[in-house]
Every structure is written in structure tokens, then in C-alpha cells.
Image (cartoon, grey):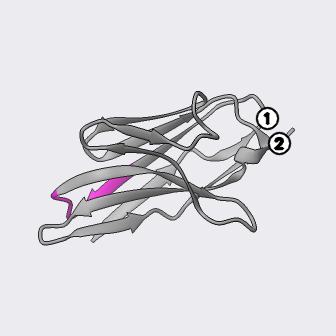
Amino acid sequence: QVQLVESGGGLVQPGGSLRLSCAASGSIFGIDAMGWYRQAPGKQRELVATITSGGSTNYADSVKGRFTISRDNAKTRYLQMNSLKPEDTAVYYCNARVWVGRSWNNYWGQGTQVTVSS
């Protein structure tokens, strides 16, 4: 069993910053890519940023230059969000593609709410 636990969401004013964390635990033999997606009310879930095991990153155009994804160790990822805008308001989900010993599986965290409002 693999779990992804997110933390760091909250309420922030426009122009402010937040840092999200995602920690993976369980029967993990390797992580291929890990990242963040978000879903705003009435909208589809969308990619925010991902980082591969080799360190390659990918960002949505809407967050380039404002958000930075990084890793602390093999199982923890961070999303530093600066210059936040009201349109960044959404539930942010951590996602990981994990080798569990016999297959690659895709896992999601429970989500953390980010609200940008004055």
C-alpha cells in the first residue's frame, strides 16, 4: 500500500506565497515522476508541475515563473507557490507514479485546499 500525504494549503492574499509538501510512504521500490495537479470548482483537474526521478521538471504555462517544484529526498516533493493569484484557488493533489515491485502504479493524495483571496 502506498500513501501520499499533502500539507501546506491554506488561505493567502493575492501576491502571497505558500509551500505545499507531499510525502510518499509504503511499499515503494522507486518513484518515476511525482507532481501536483489542481482542480477548481466546476473545472477539470489540470497539471500544475511535475518532476522526474532524474530532476526534469514540467510546468503548466499559467504557473511558469511563479511556482517551483523541488525534492528533498526520494519520497518528498515540494511546490513553492509565489505571486499567487485568485485563479490559483483550487484543491491541489499530489500524484506519483510508483514502482511497487511488480508494476508501475499511479497514486493520488487526498488533496489540500489553496484559497487566494483578499
Magenta residues span 23-29
For the residue pair 20 and 99, the one nearer the viewer reads as: 99
Identify the residue position indicated by label 1 in the image: 13
| Quadrant of residue 19 within the rendered picture | top right
Residue to which mark 2 is pinned: 117
Q: Secondary structure at mark 1?
A: loop
Real-space Cα separation, disc 1 to disc 2, in angstroms: 5 Å
Is residue 97 highlighted in magenta?
A: no
Say which element carries label 2. loop
Q: Amino acid at mark 1?
A: Gln
- Where does the image place residue 115, in percent across and percent down from the top left? 74, 48
Instruction: Tell me where residue 53 appears, x and y as whole percent.
Output: 25, 43
- Quarter of the figure with the N terminus: bottom left
Amino acid residing under circle 2: Ser
- CA neighbours of label 2 inside 10 A, class few (<14), some (14 to 19), many (20+): some
Which residue extends farthest right? 118
